[in-house]
Image (tube, rainbow, N blue to C red):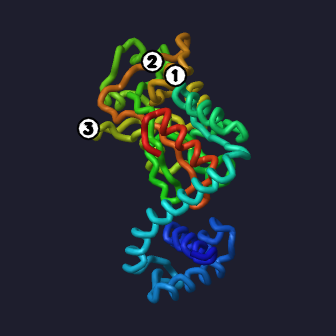
Amino acid sequence: MSAIELRELESFLVLAQELHFGRAGERLYISQSRVSQLLRSLESRIGAPLVERTSRRVRLTPLGESFLAGLRPAYDTLRATVDEARAAARGVGGKLRIGFQGTIDDCLGEAIARFGDRYPDCAIDIVEIPLCDPFGPLRRREVDCAVVLLPVAEDDLVLGPVFSRQPQALAVSVRHPFAARESLSAEELADCRLIGIAGGAPEYWRHAQAPGLTPGGCPVPAGPSVNTLQEGLSLTATNRGAMLLCRSTAEYHGRRDSITFVPVRGLPDSELGLVRPRLRPSAQAEAFAGAVGETTGTPS
């Protein structure tokens, strides 16, 4: 497979996600006309249109949909194989920038140490990323991979391993009526103002961290929105709202003089996942995914 053919495939994959030639060009750092040229070349090789283009919309043809379904896993496998071979031939050096939200627990710390021992020539930067923007630093190339709260439903990102499954707890001020409780049911969230996530995080992700309805369908009052975990904890301490957190984050940030953490029954467990760009994988990030998988006992 020649380099131009690989670029054609990359362009098609990004266009299939964006359904907009201009945005696809921005993602690929090429012009809109170049995206069109690469697509025409790919369609010429296949012998039929993959995309329908009008002045108002872009959409995949039925053949394009079928081609996309088969291409994406094959492309991922090809890139992973090339990266593994490149890493084996050259060794993993350079720098790995790991983004994280909240805290680095013992399991993740062990994975970082395992990676460092295995690849001593690779420098490691640990970068805290905002709670309100879990995927932006990856897309802006500020980090090579990121450990974020699930769910993740982004077509341009690879998810895995998934790990650290834990029950959720409600952070409340020691002055809050729930502070003396040993546990709560999820339905009782309707009786507190839940602190939300502001900014650029996708709506589905923000709603998962701060649901607007209980499992039974009762509305949960919305509290203030925050950009960072520390902002949320500060608002909680002053009794301006309550915040859902996973157990390990709650234990790490325990402030017994101002905040208490009450387990919540009936909510899905919190989980973390390692994400990295689908079309720009690095040998360092792929090697780190392997280290996380070995440490947590989960596939990458």
The image shows residue 67 at horizontal and vertical percentages of 42, 74
Which residue is label 1 attached to? 239
Looking at the image, residue 69 lies above or below residue 59 = above
N-term mark: 3 or 2:
2
- Where residue 33 sits in the image (x, y, percent)? 65, 81
- What residue lies at 61% left-to-right and 29% top-to-bottom? 230
Identify the residue position indicated by label 2 in the image: 176
Asked if disc 1 and disc 2 are in contact, CB closer than 8 Å, the reply is yes
> Which label number is shown at residue 31?
none
> Can residue 199 be spotted in the picture?
no
User: Three-letter amino acid code at disc 1?
Assistant: Asn
Compared to residue 100, the image places residue 252 above or below, namely: above
- Which residue has dot 3 on it? 216
The amino acid at mark 3 is Gly
Amino acid type of disc 2? His
- The alpha-carbon separation of the residues under discs 3 and 2 comes to 23 Å
Secondary element at tag 2 = loop
Between disc 3 and disc 2, the foreground one is 3
Crowding at dot 1, Cα within 10 Å, few <14 / some 14-19 / many 20+, comes out as some
Quadrant position of the N terminus in the picture: bottom right
* Camera-nearest residue between 195 and 122: 122
User: How far apart are the alpha carbons under marks 3 and 1?
Assistant: 26 Å
Q: Residue 92: image x %, image y %?
A: 67, 46
